[in-house]
Amino acid sequence: MRPLILIYWSRVILGIVAASISTALTLAMGERGITTFLNGLTVALFLYLVTFYVFKAKFAKKVEKQSKIMTQGIGIYFFSWLVSWVLMYTLILGQP
């Protein structure tokens, strides 16, 4: 599999993992409101940056433009994170 395709699909899965962590953090902290969103967004950004450095170390020689490692899959990462997080949050905490 080509490196950029691998990065793309890894970001889809990592977005879902970040949503799971964000939901677990919300359950642990018990907060609701804007801080819940900001905590979840912080988790998503942190995980994205960590995986960027991992992918950069692994695929630096295989990708011609290094900026593609950062931008490949950024949209689908945050889209899958947001959709998964809203779905998990609604299923777990939606009913009073």
Image (cartoon, helix red, strand yellow):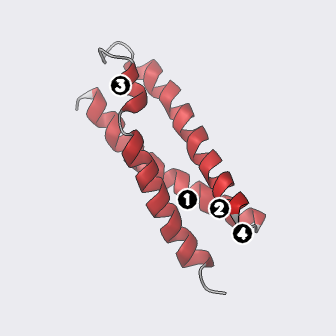
Closer mark to the observer between disc 3 and disc 2: 3
**What is the CA distance from the residue labelled 1 to the residue labelled 4?**
16 Å
In the rendering, at what x and y percent does residue 53 appear?
Answer: 52, 25
Badge 4 is on which residue?
A: 32
The reply to whether dot 1 and dot 3 touch (C-beta < 8 Å) is no
| Residue contact at pointers 1 and 4, CB within 8 angstroms | no
Q: Which residue is mark 3?
A: 68
Report the front residue among 42 and 59.
42
Which residue type does callout 3 highlight? Answer: Lys
Q: Amino acid at mark 1?
A: Ser
Mark 2 Cα-neighbour bin, 10 Å: few <14, some 14–19, many ≥20: some
Q: Which residue is mark 2?
A: 24
Locate residue 43, reporting x and y percent.
62, 47
Labels 1 and 2 touching (C-beta < 8 A): yes
What is the secondary structure assignment of the residue under circle 3?
Answer: helix
Q: Residue furthest left?
A: 1
Q: Of helix, strand and loop, which one carries label 1?
A: helix
On-image quarter of the C terminus: bottom right
Q: Position of residue 50 (x, y in %)?
A: 56, 32
Q: Are marks 2 and 4 in contact (CB under 8 Å)?
A: no
